[in-house]
Image: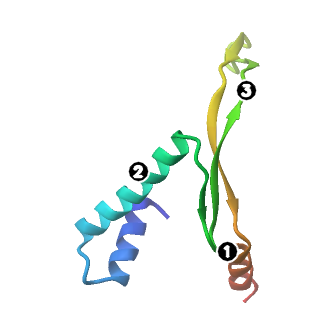
Amino acid sequence: MTKSELIDELTAQTPEISRRDMEIIVNAVFDTMTLSLAQHDRIEIRGFGSFIAKQRGARAARNPRTGEKVTVPKKWVPFFNVGKELRERINKIIAR
Protein backbone atom coordinates (compact mmCIF):
# COMPACT_ATOMS: atom_id res chain seq x y z
CA MET A 1 0.00 0.00 0.00
CA THR A 2 1.35 3.39 -0.97
CA LYS A 3 0.89 6.58 1.04
CA SER A 4 -1.66 7.78 -1.53
CA GLU A 5 -3.63 4.53 -1.18
CA LEU A 6 -3.51 4.88 2.61
CA ILE A 7 -4.91 8.42 2.35
CA ASP A 8 -7.67 7.22 0.00
CA GLU A 9 -8.60 4.35 2.36
CA LEU A 10 -8.72 6.62 5.42
CA THR A 11 -10.78 9.18 3.51
CA ALA A 12 -13.26 6.46 2.52
CA GLN A 13 -13.57 5.38 6.17
CA THR A 14 -14.13 8.96 7.39
CA PRO A 15 -16.17 10.81 4.73
CA GLU A 16 -16.54 13.87 7.00
CA ILE A 17 -12.81 14.60 6.51
CA SER A 18 -11.73 15.79 3.06
CA ARG A 19 -8.97 14.05 1.17
CA ARG A 20 -6.79 17.18 1.39
CA ASP A 21 -7.22 17.33 5.18
CA MET A 22 -6.49 13.60 5.46
CA GLU A 23 -3.31 14.09 3.43
CA ILE A 24 -2.23 16.83 5.85
CA ILE A 25 -2.93 14.55 8.82
CA VAL A 26 -1.02 11.59 7.37
CA ASN A 27 1.94 13.79 6.41
CA ALA A 28 1.97 15.32 9.91
CA VAL A 29 2.07 11.84 11.50
CA PHE A 30 4.90 10.67 9.23
CA ASP A 31 6.86 13.92 9.68
CA THR A 32 6.54 13.66 13.47
CA MET A 33 7.68 10.04 13.43
CA THR A 34 10.63 10.92 11.18
CA LEU A 35 11.69 13.76 13.48
CA SER A 36 11.44 11.51 16.55
CA LEU A 37 13.60 8.82 14.94
CA ALA A 38 16.13 11.46 13.85
CA GLN A 39 16.37 12.49 17.51
CA HIS A 40 16.94 8.80 18.43
CA ASP A 41 13.61 8.54 20.26
CA ARG A 42 11.73 5.26 20.38
CA ILE A 43 8.21 5.24 18.91
CA GLU A 44 5.80 2.71 20.37
CA ILE A 45 2.27 2.26 19.03
CA ARG A 46 0.44 -0.18 21.31
CA GLY A 47 -1.04 -3.11 19.42
CA PHE A 48 0.98 -2.27 16.31
CA GLY A 49 4.71 -2.21 17.03
CA SER A 50 7.70 -0.02 17.75
CA PHE A 51 10.20 1.92 15.68
CA ILE A 52 13.78 2.67 16.70
CA ALA A 53 16.84 4.07 14.96
CA LYS A 54 19.99 1.95 15.31
CA GLN A 55 23.46 3.01 14.37
CA ARG A 56 25.16 0.84 11.78
CA GLY A 57 28.94 1.07 12.08
CA ALA A 58 31.39 2.01 9.36
CA ARG A 59 32.64 -0.90 7.28
CA ALA A 60 34.74 -1.82 4.30
CA ALA A 61 32.86 -2.97 1.20
CA ARG A 62 33.42 -3.49 -2.51
CA ASN A 63 31.94 -1.65 -5.45
CA PRO A 64 30.05 -4.43 -7.30
CA ARG A 65 30.70 -2.83 -10.68
CA THR A 66 34.47 -2.33 -10.39
CA GLY A 67 35.43 -4.55 -7.46
CA GLU A 68 37.20 -1.55 -5.94
CA LYS A 69 37.37 -1.35 -2.15
CA VAL A 70 35.25 1.43 -0.65
CA THR A 71 34.54 2.60 2.89
CA VAL A 72 30.90 2.84 3.91
CA PRO A 73 30.51 5.44 6.69
CA LYS A 74 28.49 4.81 9.84
CA LYS A 75 24.82 5.70 9.55
CA TRP A 76 21.51 5.52 11.38
CA VAL A 77 18.95 3.00 10.11
CA PRO A 78 15.28 2.72 11.20
CA PHE A 79 14.05 -0.63 12.49
CA PHE A 80 10.49 -1.82 13.08
CA ASN A 81 9.52 -4.49 15.61
CA VAL A 82 6.02 -5.83 15.10
CA GLY A 83 3.75 -5.95 18.16
CA LYS A 84 2.23 -9.17 19.43
CA GLU A 85 -1.35 -8.06 18.75
CA LEU A 86 -0.62 -7.11 15.11
CA ARG A 87 1.23 -10.39 14.54
CA GLU A 88 -1.71 -12.37 15.92
CA ARG A 89 -4.25 -10.40 13.84
CA ILE A 90 -2.26 -10.99 10.65
CA ASN A 91 -1.93 -14.70 11.36
CA LYS A 92 -5.67 -14.95 12.08
CA ILE A 93 -6.53 -13.31 8.74
CA ILE A 94 -4.07 -15.50 6.82
CA ALA A 95 -5.37 -18.68 8.51
CA ARG A 96 -8.91 -18.13 7.14
Coordinates of residue 34 in the picture (x, y in percent): 48, 47
Q: Residues within 10 Å of mark 1 (few under 14, many from 20)?
A: some
Q: Earlier in the sequence, mark 3 or mark 1?
A: 3
In the image shown, does 31 or 8 lie closer to the viewer?
31
- Neighbours of disc 2 within 10 Å: few (<14), some (14-19), many (20+): few
Residue at numbered disc 3:
57
Question: Identity of the amino acid at label 2?
Answer: Asp
Near-viewer residue (23 or 69): 23
Task: Please tell me which residue is depicted at 23% across the width and 65% down the height of the picture.
Answer: 20
Disc 3 is placed on an element classified as loop
* Between discs 1 and 2, the one toward the N terminus: 2
Residue bearing the label numbered 2 = 31
Q: Which mark is residue 17?
A: none
Rounded to the nearest angstrom, the CA distance separating label 2 from label 3 is 26 Å
Q: Which mark is residue 86?
A: 1
The structure residue drawn at horizontal position 64% and vertical position 59%, both measured from the top left corner, is 50
